[in-house]
Image (cartoon, rainbow, N blue to C red):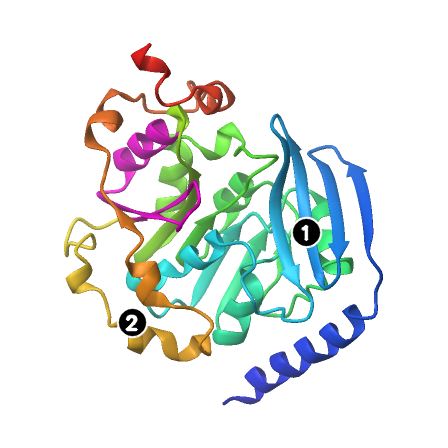
Amino acid sequence: MTMRTLFLRFLLVLVSAAALSGADYVERYDTLYNSLTIERRGTQVELRAKSREGDYLESAVDLADPLNLVVPYTRSLYGGLFFQPKPQKVLMIGLGGAGFHRLFMAAYPEVLLQSVELDPKVVELTRERMYFTPTANSPIATVDGRQFVKRSREKWDWLILDAFRGGYVPPHLKTKEFYEECAARMSDEGVFITNLHSGTELYYADLKTLRTVFPQVILFQTKNRGNVIAFAVKYASPDMTNPARWPPTAELSAPLQGRLDLASIRAEVIPWPTARVARAKVMTDDFSPVEFLDAMEENNTKR
């Protein structure tokens, strides 16, 4: 165990001890980008954003156990290990409440985990109410995700898109041109990871758009949830969609301290919806009706 790992664990203990002394509360904030609610019940803190269907859970943390992945889909994001098991540079567009970050930082303390978050209030609440402490290896840039990708000169081994605002992703982060910009900033063996919501026409349009840029895309459905995590790569060979080619789960699990059942995540793979994707439209900078498509249930085209 390295000194850096020991330091991160010690820091988590100190943060947890300070956080556990707090009382329950509900706070609401309107910002330029969001209508946010931060609520504490016992040791759990939730960050939510208003959507057309009510409050949308952005992130959550258990202050008694900060490494616990409270929101189920954050576990599925670790499927990136099957495609790039040794990331050195990770870019995450969308901070939320840093629900993904704490375990990743403890497991891979030497890896750069760069976060990008548009809303300064989200950053403030994540730090002050959810007790997330950035380090030199986990900086946060408060800027639009697409602008960061355009300006970045790094090559990312994992590029994660999880930039929901009240249940939907801003349209300029859903287009063919943006995915091309992401691909250009990925390492040759890097993986693009994006959190999608199934059940609407937007889902199929997003898949079709991804496939116009990335030769290979594979889908994981988070167990008992509507989240589908898409993993995409720039290369056509070898076949990354064949689980027989993936590294053994036992080999990948060691740094994760028993926190994740990678075998169960491996079992989340779902078939590619060929027929529905074929009927979908590619989203571009000139045509990206994200909110309209997100409001259309997937069976509307049959009526």
Mark sitting earlier along the chain (2/1): 1
In the image, residue 177 above or below residue 1: above
Q: Are marks 2 and 1 in contact (CB under 8 Å)?
A: no
SS at badge 1? strand
Q: Is residue 93 in view from this perspective?
A: yes
Magenta part of the protein: which range? 203-232
Residue 126 position, x and y percent, is 70, 55
Q: Is residue 147 left or right of residue 134?
A: left
Question: Which one is nearer the viewer's eye here, 214 or 195?
Answer: 195
Question: Which one is nearer the viewer's eye here, 246 or 37?
Answer: 37
Give yes or no for residue 197 being in the magenta stretch: no
Q: Is residue 65 left or right of residue 176?
A: right
Question: Which one is nearer the viewer's eye here, 238 or 53?
Answer: 53
The mark found on residue 46 in the picture is: 1
In the image, residue 110 above or below residue 121: below
Q: Which residue is mark 2?
A: 249
Give yes or no for residue 231 being in the magenta stretch: yes
Count of marks placed on residues: 2
Q: Residue at x 54, y 31 (%)?
A: 170
Q: Residue at x 69, y 67 (%)?
A: 63
Residue 130 position, x and y percent, is 71, 59
Neighbor class of circle 2 (other Cα within 10 Å; few <14, some 14-19, many 20+) is some
Q: Residue at x 44, y 77 (%)?
A: 258
Residue 300 position, x and y percent, is 37, 15
Q: Is residue 68 left or right of residue 174?
A: right
Q: In which quadrant will I find the C terminus?
A: top left
Q: Amino acid at mark 2?
A: Thr
The quarter of the displayed image where residue 32 is located? top right
Q: Amino acid at mark 1?
A: Glu
Residue 292 position, x and y percent, is 48, 18
The mark found on residue 268 in the picture is: none
Label 2 to label 1: alpha-carbon separation: 31 Å
